[in-house]
Amino acid sequence: MDIEKKDLLQLYYYLKLTRSLEDRITNLYRQGKIVGGVYTSNGQEAIAVGYACALEKDDIIAPFHRDMGAFLVRGITPKRVIAQYLGKRDGPTKGKDGNVHVGDLKLGVICFVSHLADNLPVAAGIALSFKLRGEKRIVATNTGDGATSRGDFHEALNFAAIHKLPVVFFCNNNQYAYSTPLRLQMAVKDVAERASGYGIPTEIVDGNDIIAVYKSARNAYARAREGGGPTFIECKTMRMHGHSEHDDAKYVPKELLEEWRARDPILRMEKYLIGNNLADEKVLKEIEDKIRIEIDEATDFAEKSPYPEGRETLEGVYADPIEEEVTVHERGKLSGGNITRVA
Amino acid sequence: MDIEKKDLLQLYYYLKLTRSLEDRITNLYRQGKIVGGVYTSNGQEAIAVGYACALEKDDIIAPFHRDMGAFLVRGITPKRVIAQYLGKRDGPTKGKDGNVHVGDLKLGVICFVSHLADNLPVAAGIALSFKLRGEKRIVATNTGDGATSRGDFHEALNFAAIHKLPVVFFCNNNQYAYSTPLRLQMAVKDVAERASGYGIPTEIVDGNDIIAVYKSARNAYARAREGGGPTFIECKTMRMHGHSEHDDAKYVPKELLEEWRARDPILRMEKYLIGNNLADEKVLKEIEDKIRIEIDEATDFAEKSPYPEGRETLEGVYADPIEEEVTVHERGKLSGGNITRVA
Amino acid sequence: MKEVSYLEAISQGLRDEMRRDKNVFILGEDVGVYGGAFKVTQGFYDEFGPERVIDTPLAESGFTGAAIGAALMGMRPVVEMQFSDFITCAFDQIVTMAAKSHYRWGASVPIVIRAPYGGMIHGGPFHSGCPEGWFFQTPGLKLVAPSTPYDAKGLMKAAIRDNDPVIYFEHKYLYRRIKAEIPDDDYIVPIGRAEIKRPGNDISLITYGAMVHVALDAAKILEGEGIDLEVIDLRTLLPLDKRTIFGSAKKTNKVIILHEASKTGGIGAEVSALIAEELFDSLDGPIVRIAAPDTPVPFSPPLEEFYMPKAGDVVSAAKRLAAY
Amino acid sequence: MKEVSYLEAISQGLRDEMRRDKNVFILGEDVGVYGGAFKVTQGFYDEFGPERVIDTPLAESGFTGAAIGAALMGMRPVVEMQFSDFITCAFDQIVTMAAKSHYRWGASVPIVIRAPYGGMIHGGPFHSGCPEGWFFQTPGLKLVAPSTPYDAKGLMKAAIRDNDPVIYFEHKYLYRRIKAEIPDDDYIVPIGRAEIKRPGNDISLITYGAMVHVALDAAKILEGEGIDLEVIDLRTLLPLDKRTIFGSAKKTNKVIILHEASKTGGIGAEVSALIAEELFDSLDGPIVRIAAPDTPVPFSPPLEEFYMPKAGDVVSAAKRLAAY
Ligand SMILES: Cc1ncc(C[n+]2csc(CCOP(=O)(O)OP(=O)(O)O)c2C)c(N)n1
Ligand SMILES: Cc1ncc(C[n+]2csc(CCOP(=O)(O)OP(=O)(O)O)c2C)c(N)n1
Ligand SMILES: [Mg+2]
Ligand SMILES: [Mg+2]
């Protein structure tokens, strides 16, 4: 599969945008401006950007908490992301929820819930709806290595496998679940081994190689779209920051970080672009500049965005709220009298 | 591994006892004497009897609803079983629970809850306690094919694998979960494939061959006892009755039943014993007669056993009930006043 | 108008909606070829095919989550719990994923979860439960619990058309024990509306589910004693129909609440608290609750009999209260 | 006596019990090397080793079930939920397996589940919840919720020594915000006993958790208004200490119930209903409930601020009630 130059540059753009946006958010966090915690995908951006760029417009993502790149690719703007992190009304959840709990149905982004792996059965159900309606759409969903230990992972993959649903399960294997290393999460070497137990084809890719991620995604999507059923794609990577920005991650061996720093997905993509004459320093500089402006503007926008007002707390619990007063009762007479008891 | 004659005869005895007891319960059900539903292990007795006979006295079982044979082997008498089915006070749950929800800690039998697969994490935890205390005891737990689709299956096997716990997971694969055939439960051929995803050694045995079940169990137990960790043993069999006795199981193809009827575990064991000169018709007849008397007596006992009294409903909710009145308050003075607020 | 059982009324509501709206589909254990453990979906598989009547693996969290996903895409899935007791296995998906979705990001989750519940069928601790209380402190959910064939059909249709997640508690004891003539045609019983099943002037009895019939029995006995019981069937448990509850309590000034679920933390506590807070000045006597004791549901007939609230309990409570 | 924070008091209770009884062990996510998300178990891994401080996989149902199994064998496991919100994933094991065990077959399940709960930490809908209400209608469970360092340590010890499953709700907001001198030595706060945190004569305010401090603030303000508030800290939510509740209500004849959890179906409803049923004749005014509104916990500061019950709410309710 050949990837066109413009697509490669797009991959690069989103990698950079993701890194820069999250760096900005981390900065704002250090300045005490962020509400709550900050979870970044630093060093792992290639996974989210790669799988999201490989999708079609009508497809859906059911992401997890290290998928900033996928939000951006789907069209959730840096403005809205920062507004969300600041608890402002212009965030996708209008201040009701925070940080990476970003969702927008019009953009095909399912809003992540904290409860890890809960998104997987939901993704399977979305895929089921496509199958039932005969639509050629697919779902991409992502999860951490740790979250694959949850029962919902099992129930979702099994269901998707039985019904050959058009869903592709990604796993961001960044080797830690908070402080817990892989060997305390599972007794197998690769998360992918878990998926084989469902009869789902699996693949293991270098999650820091965006081109590899993108290609694997394209293949799996094509198969899913044609009725070939789900695929599980394990993307090996490394969490380069703490679990969230308050965590210094002392429990991670320094050498491991060093090893992976050398494999940074952005540096790698830059080398690739330059090495293959697809871009030069100037082009990359232009992209960087453009992104800096975009993020400055977004920060500005978000900081100026109003907070929701206290009373908005009460809004939106129900899609169909029940009016306190009714005008017409549904029936003139009582049903109590007409009942026959059989036993 | 050679099995001694007396052990082989014991296996046969429990096979017969299980079949006869369940047949009696089915009869009582048809006479309208049973409270609630009846679930039998008809045609599948070799699994429960086999795995239970292979255990040591101090081991524990965390059984499921087709494990009558294991109850009996552990020493839960036919008297108590029938009393349980009749809702009598002499049942192991004193009428609080019914049918196969039989448990007795002194006999090492964990009381089954209806929620399928819930017993699996519990079994893992029991094994964990043995490991923590350095006891050479093990746990055997059993589950249906259908129940392996539940998240608790996944979470339990994974936990057991990580900590190399002394637990052996059996699966009674009787090809149906209520009316649902295997192909709607999973997209793999063998349930055992699921277990490999956890790094647990698996084995597939003919669940209607009690000698095979017994031998596999012995091997797995020995390994577990020596710190070798869990094993998953899939026992292929067929559910010969309906899901419960009210179910005519029209959804099961006749040929499938015929095929498996020919493989009945009891007939097979009889042939084996006679063919190897371990018993003759007379010995078998003696066993049968002994069992008939035992079950007649048990039926009689259970029918005469008193019901619990209504007020017993209120007993035993808590192990440590809270007395309504206290004499000494734990402290003379109030703590409200001494508190410092930091923020 | 044809006389149908409570169970047939549920089926009818479900079948009608599936015919009316191709987005409606069913999933659960043994709902297809077998027609469901209680045969509510009997014949559905033949009529609507395996794509709209899906036999799931034994995995309540998984298939509830799948229903939520499909609902987010505009489908209207109806999930069957084989027994409502097993809904504990799907608890997380319901309260985490479905209930909070619209509040958080404006995405509605129009699922219906059918939950066959309740006792007196000798089901023991795991097949007799009344789990409605576990879901009651969950803003974003709606809970309904019909007591008659009319309401069963009308609430099923309303639940399926509603854009919020609805748990539909259908009482197993009533399935084949209650019949009534109900309209063949399309009608709904709106969610959020209680109904006065028997008007009365002396005491308001507020209840739902199978206990409605226990209350009506008690009302008949009390007639003989000169006590005129008003029987209110909540029908919708969440959100509660305060208007009907308050209207009745204001009229009679005396309230009994009756439910089959165990007493502590039951829905009756909320009904009582609402009245004690907002209608204190109208009250002429204590707010009485009649409920099962705080134990699991026991199996053996004498225990279960003891456990269940009975018409006699209502009668004696009403007499005591009338004396106030 | 040393001044320790609420969090240190929890740790102390836990550590003491682990030293005292080798059957006590801890399991949960990141409780080992990391010392827990809130550092409650900091240093435990070094002192007790990986066998007694177990970092589990991310699988709440699995490790809760494992704890139950170990408890059945006589161990005394303490399970940490990283945030109490995630307890929904273990709901089934808790209510199905643990809560009903002793009733059904006499096998006790001495587990403690630590559930860091509550808001005002900008945690949003999934890190701020008060899930106690979801477990309240579950006979066989015990629920405790300390509000002070003294109670935190004493209830932890009592919970670990108790033979029933106990959910220990520790309020995250209090962790480092409340300090008090507490005894170094061994003491317990018995399960099932409320405490009057401030005696008063005019109105009984019944509450628990972080709201105890809100109530004490309100009491101070009300002193200036000549209203003498009695503040009762439930400490144990299940089973409720009726004796203390009733004793106070009988004295003051006026009751306010305050909790952080959303109003409908909260524990306050049960407290109110108990009083409305058993002490009606003693009441001089409506039973008032102050609680969060019926919504998920919102994230943004102005929303969360609006959401949380405040001392001002208590003050105005108390003034209205005093006028009765
Ligand atoms: C059900 C559940 N339990 C616990 C948590 C708390 N928690 C948040 S992130 C995390 C670790 C996740 O690890 P992993 O799945 O590998 O994702 P990563 O953060 O490493 O990308 C934990 C334990 C949660 N969010 N959900
Ligand atoms: C969690 C849960 N969901 C549903 C049920 C209802 N149910 C009881 S037995 C059964 C089928 C079980 O199939 P399997 O595990 O294969 O065991 P088998 O009965 O075939 O031996 C079902 C669905 C249950 N008991 N528990
Ligand atoms: Mg990870
Ligand atoms: Mg089966």
Image (cartoon, coloured by chain):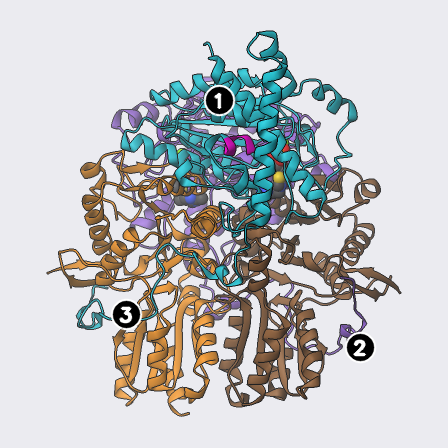
Chain colours: A purple, B cyan, C brown, D orange
Please give the name of the residue rendered at 45% of the width and 48% of the height, measured from the top-left corner: D101
Q: Chain of mark 2?
A: A
Above or below B205: residue D216:
below
Residues at marks 3 and 1, common chain? Answer: no
In the rendered structure, does residue B70 fall within the stretch colored magenta? yes
User: Are dots 2 and 1 in contact, CB under 8 Å?
Assistant: no
Q: Nearer the viewer, residue A111 or D70?
A: D70
Q: Residues within 10 Å of mark 1 (few under 14, many from 20)?
A: some
| Secondary structure, magenta segment, majority class | helix
Q: Dot 1 corresponds to which residue?
A: A205
**Is residue A41 shown to the viewer in this render?**
no
Q: Quadrant of the C terminus of chain C?
A: bottom right
Q: Is residue B5 above or below residue A254?
A: above
Which residue appears farthest toward the left when viewing the image? D1
Task: Residue C90 in the image: state x and y as whole percent.
Answer: 56, 47
Task: Please state which of residues C94 and D293 is positioned toward the viewer in this rendering.
Answer: C94
Please state which amino acid type lies under the numbered disc 1: Val
The disc, 2 or 1, on the residue closer to the chain's N-terminal end is 1
Q: Amino acid at mark 2?
A: Lys
Q: Nearer the viewer, mark 3 or mark 1?
A: 3
Identify the residue position indicated by label 2 in the image: A333
Q: Which residue is mark 3?
A: B326
Beta carbon at label 2 within 8 Å of ligand 2 = no
Q: Tell me which image quadrant ligand 2 sits in.
A: top right
A97 vs D222, left or right, is: right
Whether residue C64 is visible, yes or no, is: yes
In the image, what residue occupies the spot 74% across and 65% down? C148
Residue segment shown in magenta: B67-72
> CA–CA distance between discs 3 and 2?
55 Å
Q: Secondary structure at mark 1?
A: strand
